[in-house]
Structure formats: C-alpha cells, structure tokens
C-alpha cells in the first residue's frame, strides 16, 4: 500500500514537471501559431487573449492577396529541399556503400567528412557567393540545393554508412556466388534492403534543407528565395505586421513538424545511429 | 584488381563533390584572404600579403569582440543545454502514461528552423504585443522593474532561452537513446543492494553516459560558436553590437561592407581560434578514455 501510494505520488510529480517543461519548450511555437489565427484587434489586446475567434485573414494576405509572393517562396523551399535530397542520395549512396564494404579511404575519409561539420558555414558563403555568380548558380534552386547538400553531408553520410553496415554481408556474398557483379548486388540486394534507411535519410535531409537559412540568405536574391529567408526579410522590408509575420512563420515551421509527428521513429532512428560514433 | 577499380569508382561521386564544393572553394577562400578584394574590384584582386589578417585583428574591426561573444555564448549554451538535456533524459528513463506523446512534443523544437526561432522570439518578446513581455512585466511590476527582453540588459538571456529551447531536445534525444541501451540489470542489482537514486546516478548512469556527454558537449560547443541564424533574425547582432557573434561579424564585413578579402581573413582567424582548442580537447579526452 505504502509503495503504491508512493508510485502514484511519483507519477503525479512527474506529470507536473513534464507539463511545465512542455509549456516552457513549446510556448514560443504555440504563441506564433495563435498569433497567425488572431484578428488584428485580438493581437493588439492587453492582456493577451488565449480564447478568440480564429480568422484566416493573415494567411490570405501573406499568401494570396497581399502581393508578397510568399506562395512562391513556399514552393521554392519545397523544390530546394526535394532537389537537395536527390543530390544528396546521388552523391552519397554509392560512396557510403564503398566505405561500409571496402573501407575506401580508411578511417581518415570518414573522419574528414564528419570534420566538415566543424567548419562554420560562413566560411563557405564567401567563396560560394563569388564562384556561384561566375557559374550562373547564384539565385537558382539548383545552386542553393547544392549548398544545402554540402551543409548536410557530414550529418547524412555517416547515417547512410551505419544503415549499410547493418545489412548482413552474407546476402551479398550469396548474390556474388550466383553470378551478380558489384552493380548487380547493389541494385538487387543492397538498395531494396536499404530502403528504410533511404527514407529516414531523405526525411532528415529534407527537414534540414527546409530549415537552412544562411546559405539561402547569401545565395538568393529574387528568384530562388525560400520561405525562411522570406520570413526573415519580412521584418525589415514591411515594417511591423505581426499577424502576417506569424502566418508566414507558421507556414515555415509546419512542414517539418508534420513530418516529425508522422514519421517520428524513422527520424529518431536515423538521427541517433550515424552522427555520433 | 577488378575489385580495386570498382570500389574507387563507387567512391567517386562524393570525392568529386568534395573536390568541387569543398577543396576548391577553400583554396579560393585562402586566395581571397591574401588579396584586397571588395565589391568594386571583385574581378581584379590585388595581392596584399598578410595585411588583411593584421587588419582583422585591429580592435576597431570588432572581430575580437565578436569572438569573445561567441565563446561566452557557446559556454553558457552548452552548460545550460547539457544540464537540462540530461535531466530530461533521466526523467524519460522509465515507462509512464503518455510517454510517446511527450517524446514527440519535446523533439519538435529541435526540428524547427533556428532562423524561424529568431522570428518566433521577436513575436514573443517584442515590446508592443509580445505575450511573454506582458507576463514577464506583470511579475516585474511587483519589483518596480520594467523589462525589455530584447533590450540591452536582457537580449543575451532571451537569446540563450530561445537557443536552449531549440537545442536541448538534440542533447536529450541522444542521451535518452543511449540510456535505453544501458542494461537494466545493473540498476536492478544496485537497487537490491539498497543503493539510493543518487548513488545509482553517480556510480552507474553518469559513468555510462560520460563519453557521449563529452562528444555532445564538443559538437554543441562548435555549433553554438558558429551560430548565425537565430541571432540574425532575433537581434541582428544588436542592440549595438552586443550580440554580434563571429559569424554575424564576418557576414557584416563581407556582405554589408563588401570587403571580401578582410572577411575571408577574419573568417579563417575565427575558425582557427575555435579549431585549435577544440582539437586539443578532443585529443586529450580520447587519450584519457582509451587508457
């Protein structure tokens, strides 16, 4: 009885701590989403209102009628993140396989890729700005997607290698005995088994590319601006319009949140298996 | 011999990518650092030796001040976030109702854009309609204070709070998954022997997590040191230059003032000032742990 009472008390305390924790950690996000749905009058009300009649005015103004082009920025973000994911897979799958199975480049190669993480992105913005201008890649979806691939490579590459490490080698050996070449083994044995890994890595890369800011800020001017950069510029360019700013920010943070809610376990598994070892 | 060719062919895509987008730009960055290059003569750099590096160290440029800010910011951020992340991981290291939902909720900030966290902070902490500003000041009124969360006295604290919300989930996630692979028998055996919760933490859990805590501290320190996004969208480096980090300073030199040469030299100096102590720490801890 005593132990039971203690257990109940314990779980009540635990719940209180967790609810307070969630409040502290999620209130900034919740506040933004609430603002996006408040009318201008409710936004200005003192004290702040938590119960109000939700309106879609700010979304409509930011994305449709206001002439701000945030609809286009949203599409740009989607294109950049998708393209960057494709480039990432193309650049890293085969090499990750070579590192996992043949230990290409030894430990040094892997370490060099991981070490890239310690290079501040600001270092790369300077040459990229000039070189991408010269190559015609500045202010293009492709250019920003490539820059994002570089930023995400040190995170995604080790994850891919760990996923390949987990595929039993015996299957490949059996396929080789059956007369498959290396490319045949890759296509018929490794890639199908790697599919969960590819899905996890794609989500992770998509989210990180969607969230990236500095590279896109430097490399975009008119055509390829993603929504994060657009939202950041909003404050400077259009003065104080809190409702529209909140609506744009809500649209910018929602896609990653939806992906996390739907595919949490994929993402957790991917993130925790590669980065740190 | 055949295998030799195939494996190198397979490694080619990443190698080529690194050559074009890492090695070549890095060489070009060094080249810029030794030349006078501005927006005006971007096509005709003029060699100037180590002048840019000397200029970058001049206190009037503000690079040194920004570096000391970045160190301070990184130290505080790592200390706060490691502590909170560890507490959360310990809290989650048991089964309870609603665990899955709480887990998702605590992970959300980590996968929210840092740049957007800056904007979110502006919406929350501005002086006009900021919800948090209102509640903070309803309490501060009791003490006859008026607090501007983005003003010069509080901007640093506000920044640390937002960065902590953004990145504690990262620390928490890794510690939590690592704890789950700690064999339960160890803890059960200790409990049977009558060990207190604190003793179990000190003698079993903490030593088990220590290597990972070290790695997380190093990674988070480096990430916090190079922070750009959240500061740029929250304060823009201000008020004045109070929150100007290393990355913000380099950005200003290059993309606001248009001085590519000076900015390149400054970015390299900052990188080495971060990299040298960091690699010493890594080498030292590796040696100690491998003994």
Image (tube, rainbow, N blue to C red):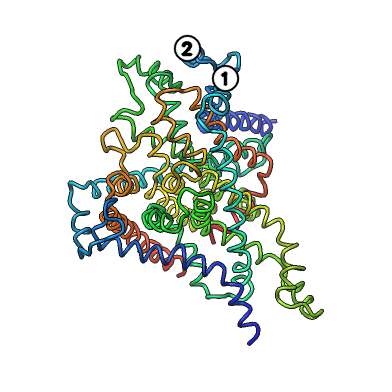
On whether disc 2 and disc 1 are found on a single subunit, the reply is yes
Q: Residue at x 66, y 36 (%)?
A: B101
Mark 2 or mark 1, earlier in chain: 2
Q: Residue at x 59, y 35 (%)?
A: A254
Q: Is residue B203 visible?
A: no
Q: Residue B230 occupies which quadrant of the picture? A: top left
Picture quadrant of residue A120: bottom left
Label 1: which secondary element? helix
Q: Residue at x 49, y 62 (%)?
A: A114
On screen, residue A239 versus residue A36, left or right, reads left
Cα distance between the residues tagged 2 and 1: 17 Å
Where residue A151 sits in the image (x, y, percent)? Answer: 49, 55
Q: Position of residue B152 (x, y in %)?
A: 28, 30
What chain does mark 1 sit on? A
Horizontally, residue B291 falls left or right of residue A254, namely: left
Which label number is shown at residue B154?
none
Left or right of A142: which side holds B260?
left
Residue B11, percent across and down?
58, 72
Callout 1 crowding tier (Cα within 10 Å): few <14, some 14–19, many ≥20: some
Q: Which mark is residue A45?
A: 2
Where does residue B42 sit, x and y in percent of width and height?
A: 30, 56
Looking at the image, residue A255 lies above or below residue B258: above
Closer to us: A264 or A250: A250
Circle on res. A57: 1
Q: Residue at x 29, y 32 (%)?
A: B239
Between B198 and B217, the one nearer to me in the picture: B217
Numbered disc in front, either 2 or 1? 1
Crowding at dot 2, Cα within 10 Å, few <14 / some 14-19 / many 20+, comes out as: few
Q: Are marks 2 and 1 in contact (CB under 8 Å)?
A: no
Quadrant assignment for the C terminus of chain A: bottom right
Residue A3, placed above or below residue A212: above
Identify the residue at the far right of this view: A178
């Amino acid at each position: 009885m005593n132990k039971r009472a203690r257990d109940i008390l314990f779980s009540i305390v635990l719940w209180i701590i967790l609810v307070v924790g969630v409040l502290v950690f999620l209130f900034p996000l919740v506040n933004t989403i609430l603002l996006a749905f408040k009318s201008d009058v409710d936004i200005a009300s003192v004290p702040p209102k938590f119960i109000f009649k939700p309106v879609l005015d700010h979304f409509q103004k930011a994305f449709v009628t206001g002439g701000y082009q945030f609809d286009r920025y949203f599409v740009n973000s989607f294109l950049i993140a998708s393209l960057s994911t494709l480039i990432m897979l193309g650049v890293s799958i085969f090499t990750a396989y070579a590192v996992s199975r043949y230990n290409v480049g030894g430990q040094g190669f892997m370490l060099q890729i991981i070490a890239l993480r310690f290079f501040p992105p600001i270092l790369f913005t300077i040459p990229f700005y000039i070189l991408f201008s010269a190559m015609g890649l500045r202010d293009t979806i492709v250019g920003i997607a490539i820059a994002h691939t570089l930023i995400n490579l040190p995170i995604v590459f080790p994850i891919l290698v760990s996923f390949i490490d987990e595929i039993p080698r015996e299957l490949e050996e059996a396929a080789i005995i059956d007369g498959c070449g290396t490319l045949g083994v890759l296509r018929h044995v490794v890639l199908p088994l790697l599919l969960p890994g590819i899905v996890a890595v794609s989500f992770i890369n998509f989210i990180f590319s969607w969230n990236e800011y500095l590279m896109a800020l430097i490399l975009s001017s008119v055509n390829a601006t993603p929504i994060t950069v657009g939202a950041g510029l909003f404050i400077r360019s259009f003065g104080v319009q809190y409702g529209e700013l909140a609506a744009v920010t809500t649209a910018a943070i929602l896609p990653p949140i939806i992906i996390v809610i739907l595919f949490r376990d994929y993402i957790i598994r991917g993130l925790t298996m590669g980065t740190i070892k | 011999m055949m295998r030799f060719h195939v494996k190198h062919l397979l490694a080619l895509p990443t190698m080529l990518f690194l050559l074009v987008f890492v090695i070549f730009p890095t060489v070009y960055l060094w080249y810029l650092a030794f030349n006078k290059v501005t927006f005006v003569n971007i096509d005709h750099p003029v060699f100037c030796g180590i002048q840019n590096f000397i200029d970058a160290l001049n206190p009037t440029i503000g690079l040194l001040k920004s570096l000391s800010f970045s160190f301070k910011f990184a130290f505080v951020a790592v200390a706060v976030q490691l502590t909170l992340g560890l507490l959360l991981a310990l809290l989650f290291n048991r089964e309870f109702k609603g665990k899955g939902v709480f887990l998702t909720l605590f992970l959300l900030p980590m996968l929210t854009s840092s740049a957007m966290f800056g904007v979110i902070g502006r919406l929350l902490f501005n002086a006009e309609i900021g919800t948090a500003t209102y509640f903070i000041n309803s309490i501060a009124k009791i003490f006859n204070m008026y607090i501007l969360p983005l003003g010069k006295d509080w901007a640093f604290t506000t920044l640390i709070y937002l960065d902590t919300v953004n990145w504690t989930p990262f620390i928490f996630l890794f510690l939590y998954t690592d704890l789950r692979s700690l064999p339960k028998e160890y803890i059960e055996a200790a409990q049977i022997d009558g060990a207190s919760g604190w003793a179990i933490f000190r003698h079993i859990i903490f030593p088990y997590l220590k290597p990972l805590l070290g790695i997380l501290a190093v990674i988070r320190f480096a990430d916090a040191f190079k922070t750009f996004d959240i500061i740029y969208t929250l304060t823009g480096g201000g008020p004045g230059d109070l929150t100007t980090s290393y990355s913000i300073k380099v950005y200003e030199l290059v993309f606001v003032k248009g001085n590519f040469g000076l900015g390149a030299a400054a970015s390299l100096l900052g990188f080495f000032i971060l990299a040298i102590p960091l690699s010493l720490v890594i080498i030292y801890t590796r040696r100690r742990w491998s003994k």
